[in-house]
Image (cartoon, rainbow, N blue to C red):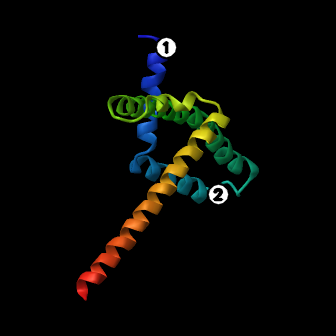
Amino acid sequence: MSSSSLFRRFAAATSTAAGRPATFIVAVLIVAVWAASGPLFGFGDTWQLVINTSTTIITFLMVFLIQNTQNRDSAAVQIKLDELIRSSHAHNALLALEELDDATLDRIRKHYWRLAERGRAELENENVEQALGDENNDV
């Protein structure tokens, strides 16, 4: 098994475990035990350093694990969306949009924004015409 595959599996398992309610409860209990031990250690610098160092290290490592998991999830969603576009009547130019530069994405976004505005205006006009038709039927 490759190191990449091992890391992927470890990152996925860690990310899944970190997102569970039980993990949150354990973290809260650790903080509560730390806080309760404050009087025992006189709320000293070492006592504060323990929680600060621990949380910093855990956060630092979790950022990379969670980012790895999110990158894979995002890639999978993009592939699924690309397949839906490819297999539908949608324009194939929309495939792999995430690879385009920002200026091109902005131009395409504006095009679809204009299409959406026209569609909303048409819908609004249909609703007005339908409402007027309903009023004429009432008379």
Between 116 and 97, the one lying in front of the other is 116
Between 46 and 3, the one lying in front of the other is 3
Between 113 and 44, the one lying in front of the other is 113
CA gap between label 2 and label 1 equals 42 Å
Q: How many marks?
A: 2
Q: Quadrant of the C terminus?
A: bottom left
Task: Residue at 67%, 54% (x, y): give it.
Answer: 41
Question: Left or right: 49 with respect to 139?
Answer: right
Q: Where 111 falls versus 135 (above or below)?
A: above
Examine the rendering and report whether any part of residue 11 can be seen.
yes
Between 56 and 109, the one lying in front of the other is 109
- Which numbered circle lies on residue 38? 2
Kind of residue sitting beneath label 2: Gly
Residue ID for mark 1: 3
Kind of residue sitting beneath label 1: Ser
Q: Where 40 falls versus 65 (above or below)?
A: below
Where residue 9 appears, as percent x and y from the top left, is 42, 24
Where residue 113 appears, as percent x and y from the top left, is 54, 50
Q: Quadrant of the N terminus?
A: top left
The local secondary structure at tag 1 comes to: helix
Marks 2/1 in contact by CB < 8 Å: the verdict is: no
Could you say which quadrant of the image residue 124 lies in?
A: bottom left
In front: mark 2 or mark 1?
Answer: 1
Q: Residue furthest right?
A: 45
Could you say which quadrant of the image residue 89 lies in?
A: top left
Estimate how packed mark 1 is, as few (under 14), some (14 to 19) or many (20 or more) residues with alpha carbons within 10 Å: few
Task: Residue at 59%, 46% (x, y): give it.
Answer: 110
Q: Residue furthest top?
A: 1
Of callouts 2 and 1, the N-terminal one: 1
Where residue 87 appears, as percent x and y from the top left, is 32, 29
Task: Residue at 40%, 51% (x, y): give it.
Answer: 21
